[in-house]
Amino acid sequence: MRIAIYARVSTEDKGQDPENQLRDLRGWCANCGHELVGEYVDRVSGRKGMAVRKQFAALFEDASKRRFDCVLFWALDRFSREGMVPTIQHLERLNSYGVTFHSYTEPHLCSDNEMVRGILLAMLATMAKQEAKRLSERVRAASSGPARKASASAGRRATARRSPRSTTRSWPPCRPQAAPRACA
């Protein structure tokens, strides 16, 4: 099988060295008898997109040309930290090119087997759909919830209670609380 390795470190100034990943990934290829056809190494945050991660973009360009059969990476967070939906889209894009993926430290994230690949991508796509739905619900709740309405009117209420001559705020009177009930 023709293998392309993708390695990534976020920074170089904190002692991170992609060679730490590459050494084990190359060894895995050799031990399994696979042909290593390319190495793609980025030294940038995994949260950045393809515009910034030049080697990541090159990996997909070569995948579209079927220059390799499988992408091998150290762990999914080394492949991408863009979030669940974009990461799954990247994996599905590889799949659409007929390229599999293999996570060295997470053997359950391996699409070498066609049946496992189908199940894994379906499960990941479902999770991405649920995450998109949750995000949409959070946005709707934030834009129409009582907190937004309360914050919009809070300034008007606070200034309405002040007398023109006083700088102290007038608060509504406190109501005595009922005595706590005994437990049965």
Image: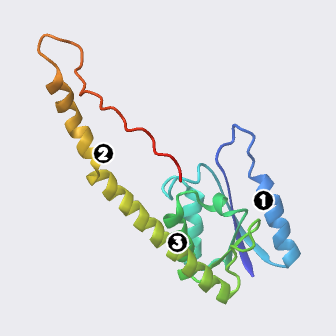
Question: Badge 3: few (under 14), some or many (20 or more) residues near its Cα, within 10 Å?
Answer: some
Left or right: 146 as drawn, with respect to 178: left
User: SS of the residue at dot 1?
Assistant: helix
Using the numbered discs, state the Cα–Cα distance from disc 2 to disc 1 in whole angstroms: 50 Å
Residue at image mark 2? 147
Do the residues under discs 3 and 1 have CB atoms within 8 angstroms? no
Taking depth in this image into account, of 80 and 120 the one nearest to the observer is: 120
Residue 22's disc number: 1
Circle count: 3
Identified at 56% across, 74% down, the residue is 124
User: SS of the residue at dot 3?
Assistant: helix
Q: Amino acid at mark 2?
A: Ala
Q: Residue furthest bottom?
A: 115
Q: Amino acid at mark 3?
A: Met
Taking depth in this image into account, of 76 and 99 the one nearest to the observer is: 76
Residue 127's disc number: 3
Q: Quadrant of the N terminus?
A: bottom right
Nearest to the eye among marks 2 and 1: give it.
Answer: 2
Q: Is residue 91 above or below residue 56?
A: below
